[in-house]
Structure formats: structure tokens, C-alpha cells
Amino acid sequence: MLDEGARRLLARFSVFARGGNLEQVEPVCGPAVDVGGDVVDSLDQLADQSLLRRIPEFDEPRFLMLQTIREFAGERLEEGGEGAMIRDRHLEAFLALAQTAQEHLFGSQRKAWLDRLDADHDNFRVALEWCVAQGDALRAMRLGASLWRYWQMRGHLHEGRRRMAQILALPTSRAFPSERLAALEAAGGLAYWQADMDDAQRLYDECVEMTRPLGDHRALANALYNAAFPRTVSARAIDEAKPMMTEAFELFRQLGDDEGLARTLWGMGLAFYYGGDYSSALPIFEEAGALNRKLDNRFGLAWSLHMLGLSAYALGDIERARKAFTEALQLFEADGDVPGLVFQLDNFAALADHDGDHLRAARLSGAALVHQASSGAGLGQLVRDQLPRPHRERLPGSGEATAFAEGQAMTRAKAAAYALEGAVTTPASGG
């Protein structure tokens, strides 16, 4: 019952998984001459005929196709011989979105951009699957490298790591050195956040090997910074981490790169913290936090506060730790940063133990563990093992097992609110 243009539009729209908004739909499904008129008007007509649904809860117009209709329309797309062309357009549209979003995942708008990526996560999945199926290593590496921080921040570490492994295994991936470098960094970052330090080290070391001969100081500084990370948590390798961080710091300083300096200060603090030198680590995290505040880097600030709090806790300055953990949790919760939130639940469990409120500690530990498992943030276990807890006996019938189960049933939002009950709200450090 549709005219030819409307049939073509319906078929083309089938490439979208769980819908799309006009920013992507128009370049993928157009031009107007192909679909019998303006794309937006034609979409409205399909929605009026119940072949598409308008999704009202989004700020901009967004359309969704029910799965049964999508399967039928997808068959028509392939029969019409346009499948590859439209899937390529879809890939280009979402690659552009991922690359644009990548630049906004650290500052004051990061929640809005993370939410935007959330809305189209299924479209990114479809785009990546198309790349891999076609053996398109170039665009697959570009898309994976652009998305890895989203996967990390929103707790999709298992999926991200699996997808990056598929991408790097594509036969032509080594034919594009700059894209492979970014993809290796992405894969190394995901392995690090899952606490697979051996794999992270292998991937990051390959980045250093690739950049040293190039004479690109910025790329080398970044590679050195990354490659030092797995070494910071290993007692046998920590002496290797410090000079690598120092070299990266000097390169960033010569480049006048304050973002790089802030990151590297944080990394240098980690080397001291995991080496047990908390007194040296604390002022470095203070400096990193102050610089991140100046740069409006909410991600860097929150993680600086996290490590500042851990250092203060280890030094016995419990109230300073409480202030740092509180501000960090508020930042992570506001931005929807899943690993950051989970780490703070553990921190607040340690504070509750210190305060003698062991049932609260058990609830927070239960919440931290269940959300760590679902997000894939295995680094949380490593940090937990490093966090000193006061020695105490677990008394039979104390109710801790019940409290732990109660914590496991909490949503992330409820657990964060529970952790923040009665917490201080003044900033932990200046800058």
C-alpha cells in the first residue's frame, strides 16, 4: 500500500537498531529524491501508518521500528540491492557520532554525551558487527577506539574487551599503524580496568614500541603514560613505572599539554601509592586534583579525589578521606560513571567499618561486589585488596550476612544514596 519512495525509506530505516534520531536518519535514509519527499515528513507519514513509532521521551525527534517490521523491511533492503550501501552509510553516521562524543567524555557535559551514546549503543553494535563481517579493520579500529571510554565509564567492559579483541584480530589491522595504535590503547585500557595486567602490559608495550621510532613526542608521552600503569600495581615492576611516568611528564611539559600533565601526575601518584609511600602520593594527588579542577576535567578530578582519599585513609586521616570519597562519589553519580561509583561504595564500606557500623559496611560491600561483577570492573577487586580494613571478629548472628544480601539487592542509585547519608559535602581539596 506504500508508494515506491515510502517503501524505500522503510527498507533503509531497517538498518537502525532500536531506532535513530534525525541527525543520523537523514544522511542514512535520504536523499529526498529517493524517498519521495522530505525525509522527516516521510518518517512522520510512516509513523502515522504505525510502521514506525515516535519516541517522545527524547529531546529531539527519534523513531523506532518494531522488530517484526524491521526484519521484514531488512529483507526488502537486501532484495533491492541497497543493503551494503545503506549499512556503509549507517556505519559512517555512527562513527562520526562516536568521534564527536569522544572529545566530550571528561568535562562538564560528559553525562549528556554518555547518555547520548547509551541511546545508540545498539546502533554502534550493529555498525561494529558490519565492519568485522566485512573485514573492514580501518573503520572498525576507528570506531572501537572512539567507543572504549564509553564502554569503560558505563560498565560495558566485558563487551568492549571482546569487541576490541575481534577488531585487532582482523587480518588487515596492521596495515593502518595510527589506527592500530589507538585500538591497542583502547584494548589495553579495557584490560587494565578488568585487572588483567598481563594483557594490558602486552598491549601497552606494543604501543611504546610503535611510537618510539616515530619522533612524535605527544604519541610517545601518551604511550609511556599508559605502559607505566600496569607496572604501578606490581611490586616487582614499580621501579620501572616511575621513570616511565617521569619521561611522559617531561614530554607533556615540553608540549605545554596541561591535560597530559594532570594525567601523568595522577599516574606518578599511583606509583607511590601502590609502592606503599602514601605520604609522597598524597600531595601528588592534591596537585593532580587542583589541575583537573582548573581544566574542568570532571573525570580526572573524581579519580584524583578517589586516590587522595585512599592515601589519606592509609595515613589515618579518616575525615579527610571521607571528604574526598564524598566529593568523588557525588561526581561519579552525577555523571553516571559506573566503575567510579562502584569503587566509592567500597571506600564507604571501609569508612563504615572504621566507624564501627559493620552492618552498613556489609550492605555497601554487597552492593559494590554485585555491581562490580555486572560492569566487569575487575580493577575494583585489586583496589579492595589494597584498602586496609580494621581487624575485627565477625560474630555469629550479627546480621552481616543479611545486610550483605540487602546490599546486593540495591540498585546503583540506591546504593550511592545510602553511602552518602550523613556524609560531608565540602570539597576535599582546593584548586
Image: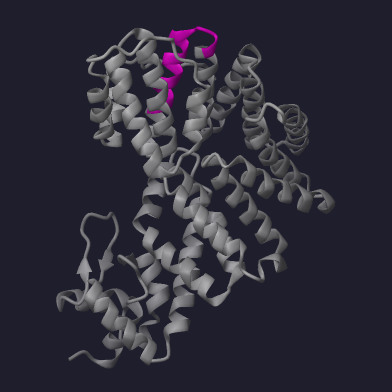
Which residue occupies the foreground of this view, 262 or 321? 321
In the image, taking residue 15 as reference, residue 45 lies left or right, namely left
Front residue (pair 26, 378): 378
**Residue located at (41% from left, 17% from top):** 350
Residue 332 placement: quadrant: top left
Residue 322 is a magenta residue: yes
- Percent from the top left, x then y, of residue 111? 39, 42
Report whether residue 337 is seen: no
- Residue 25, compared with residue 185, is above or below; it is below
Q: Characterize the magenta stretch by its predominant secondary structure.
A: helix
Residue 342 position, x and y percent, is 40, 32
Q: Residue at x 51, y 42 (%)?
A: 194
Left or right, 129 with respect to 210, comes to left
Q: Is residue 413 above or below residue 394?
A: below
Q: Residue at x 33, y 8 (%)?
A: 356
Q: Residue at x 42, y 87 (%)?
A: 82
> How many numbered tags mark residues here?
0
Quadrant position of the C terminus in the picture = top right
Segment colored magenta: 314-329
Percent x, y for residue 349? 37, 20
> Quarter of the image containing the N terminus?
bottom left
In the image, 395 versus 165, the foreground residue is 395
Q: Is residue 248 above or below residue 169?
A: above
Image position of 241 with respect to 421: above or below: below
Task: Identify the image's colour scheme: rainbow, by chain, secondary structure or one colour.
Answer: one colour
x, y percent for residue 274: 62, 23
Q: Is residue 223 visible?
A: yes
Magenta stretch: residue 325 in it? yes
Judged from this view, the residue extending furthest toward the front is 396
- Quarter-of-image position of residue 427: top left
Q: Quadrant of residue 353?
A: top left
